[in-house]
Amino acid sequence: MAHHNPFQDRHIVLGVTGGIAAYKAAELTSRLVKAGATVDVIMTDNAQEFVAPLTFQALTHRPVVTEMFALLAETEIGHVTLAKRAEALVIAPATANTIAKLALGLADNMLTTTALATTAPMIIAPAMESAMWLNAITQQHTRTLRERGAVIVGPAEGRLASGASGPGRMAEPIEIFDAVRLVLARSGDLKGRTIVVSAGGTQEPIDPVRFIGNRSSGKMGYAIAEAARDRGAEVILISGPTALPAPAGVTVLNVNTADEMARAVLLNIDGADALIMAAAVADFRPVQAEKQKIKKEAQEGLTLSLVRNPDILARVAERRENRPLPLVIGFAAETQDLIANAQEKLRHKRMDMIVANDVAAADSGFGTDTNQVTLLRADGHVEALPLMSKFEVAHRILDEVCRLLGAASPV
C-alpha cells in the first residue's frame, strides 16, 4: 500500500556480480519491484555468465545496464545518471573481487564506476567460498566499507557451491530486502524518534501449565511497530506471547505477565517520544500461582481468586507529571458503549489519544487482519475511520503521533 511505503517510487540501483548466487538476485529484484520501487540493474560481465540480463529486464521492465560504454537513452554518461538517480545502491551478490574494488575505489566497470560516483547509501551482500570470505584481506575490505557507512548483510553459514559448508553464502533475498527497507526509512517523518509499542496479550499463571489469557493476536501492535520502523523511528516492541515473527529492524522485548510488561514499559519510556499501548494487558491475575499442577482428581470444581494487576497507564501518567513526552496513545477494546467508554478511559488515564475498537464487530478486533477504529484525541477531536488493514490503521495512528509531536516539540 502506498501510504508511507518506504519503497514507493524510490529509485534503487542493484548491482549483480559474478557468483552462483546471482540467480537469487532475481528474487530480490522481484520483491523490490512488487514493493513499488523503480529498479535499475547493473550486471558485471561475469554475472552474465550465470544469469541472462533478460531475466532482470523482464522483472524490472527496464533496460539492464551491462556495458561500460553503452550510453543510456539519456545523453548523459550512464554511470553519472544512475549514480545521481540512485537512492540506494544494492550489490547482491558481491564477490570478493568486487568488494576489494569498492574498498579501494577502483572504477573499472559500470558497477564500480557508479558506486564511486554515487552518494547513495550502499547495501552489500557478500557471497563467496569460506576461505575467501575468511581471508584477512576480504575481512579488512569489508571493515573499510562498513566504516564508510555501507550496510553489510550476511554472509550466512551453509552449503556453498563447492559442496562444502561454512560462512560465505549470500544472505536470503528477504534479509537483503529488509536491510534496504531500513536504509530507505532513514528519511521518514519519524526519523530520530524513539517509539515504544506494547503488543499481544499477557498470560497470568494459575499453575505451571495453565494460565489466564485473552484473545489478542498481537497483530495490531506488530503492525504499528513495523509502520513506525518504516517511517524511520527507533522502535522498542514489548510483546506478550504471540505466534508472530519478530519484525526486522525492531528491538523486541518478550514478556509473559502484566507485571513483566509494566516493568518493561517503565524501564523503556525514559527518553522515548511516544508510548503506544496496543497490548491487551490482563486486568486480573490469580492471587497466587500454584507451584505444582492442580490435579482434577483432587476436586470437583475449581474456584480461582483473582486480584487486580498494576495499571500500567496509571503508572505512566505518574511518571509524566509536568513532562510533555512521551506521548501516550492507548487502545480501548470494548464490546458495548464504545465511544463513551473510550472517552472516559482517555480522560481518566490522561492519555494524548485513544484508539477505540469494537471487538464484537465481525471483521474488527482480535485475530483479524483488518480493523475499524475511532481515534479520540485529548483535545476533543474524534475521527471515525472506515474498515482498513491493520497496517493502514497503524499509519493513521502514526500520522496523529507526528502531528502531536510537532505540537509538543518545536523543531
Image: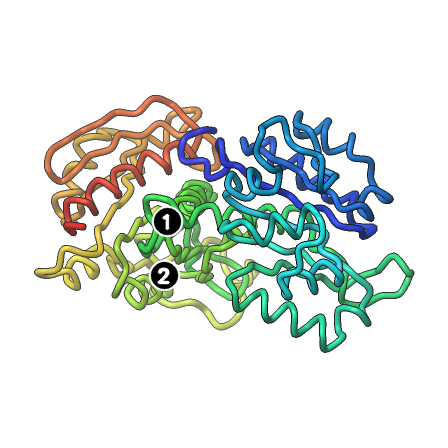
Furthest residue toward bottom: 136
Left or right of residue 66, residue 198 in this image: left
- Left/right of residue 264 with respect to residue 180 in the rendered view: left
Q: Residue at x 31, y 49 (%)?
A: 277
Crowdedness of circle 1 by 10 Å Cα count: few (<14), some, many (20+)? Answer: many
Give above or below for 232 relative to 291: above
Q: Nearer the viewer, residue 236 or 63?
A: 63
Marked residue nearer the N-terminal end (2 or 1): 2
Q: Is residue 243 visible?
A: no
Q: Nearer the viewer, residue 126 or 381?
A: 126
- Do the CB atoms of the residues marked 2 and 1 lie less than 8 Å apart? yes
Q: Which residue is mark 1?
A: 279
Residue 288 visible somewhere in the drawing: yes
Q: Callout 1, which amino acid?
A: Ala
Identified by mark 2, the residue type is Met
User: At which x and y percent is residue 171?
Assistant: 69, 55
Q: Which residue is mark 2?
A: 261
Q: What is the residue that sits farthest to the left in this orientation? A: 322
Mark 1, secondary structure of its residue: loop
